[in-house]
Image (spheres, rainbow, N blue to C red):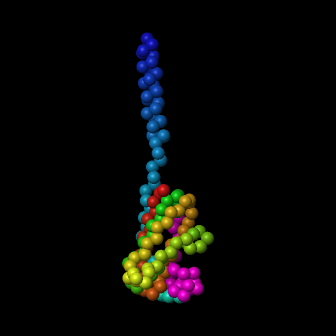
Amino acid sequence: MRSRSALAVSLVGIVAAGSLAPALAAPKKPAPIKKTYTATAPVPDPTPISGETGGNCSPTLDQAKHEAPFAIPYAGTLKVDLNGFQGDWALAVLDAKGAKIADHDNDLGTAIDEPSTITIKLKKKTTVTIRACNFAGGPTATVTLLYTAK
């Protein structure tokens, strides 16, 4: 009789452990967030070259930049690509207060129409602004965002 009792208790324990396994499993990472849009900045503004405006992607003319907010839902990595433009464009990411946290402009030894890329890690939920700037180019560019969970 004792062996039957022990067997029954063991089976109950195994069933209970099996029902808890999904709850104890590691949480599943959210799917990456991908977004693509056309940035429009019809008026080129080469004044950032002077360094007096705040550097890369800091034009004095509002028509020389396209800004788009992007909600960061959780800690992770943001990759921003700027391509599909003619001439010279630059790229920047601003924090929720409007301060520049990253920027990219091609060096003098690089073709002016080479795509720009910024990759940054973000530690918490926030909103950033993606700024695409027309330094000396055509009126549009393509911006692609990829956000992956930590």
* Residue drawn at point x = 47 percent, y = 30 percent: 16
58 or 96, nearer to the observer: 58
Camera-side residue of 18 and 116: 116
Would you say residue 113 is visible in this rendering? no
Residue interval drawn in magenta? 48-71
Q: Is residue 18 magenta?
A: no
Q: Quadrant of the N terminus?
A: top left
Task: Find out whether residue 56 is within the magenta segment.
Answer: yes
In percent of width and height, residue 71 lies at 53, 64
The location of residue 131, given as percent across then percent down, is 51, 76
Residue at 45% x, 34% y is 19
Residue 76, compared with residue 135, is above or below; it is above
- Count all numbered tags in the image, as a single digit: 0
- The quadrant holding residue 4 is top left
Image point (45%, 60%), residue name: 148
Q: Is residue 27 above or below residue 130?
A: above
Please state the horizontal and vertical placement of residue 33, each as a whole percent of the image. 44, 62
Q: Residue at x 48, y 40 (%)?
A: 24
Q: Residue furthest top?
A: 1
Please indicate, yes or no, whether residue 122 appears anywhere in the rendered image: yes
Q: Position of residue 115 (x, y in %)?
A: 40, 76
Farthest residue, direction front: 109
Image position of 118 with respect to 24: above or below: below
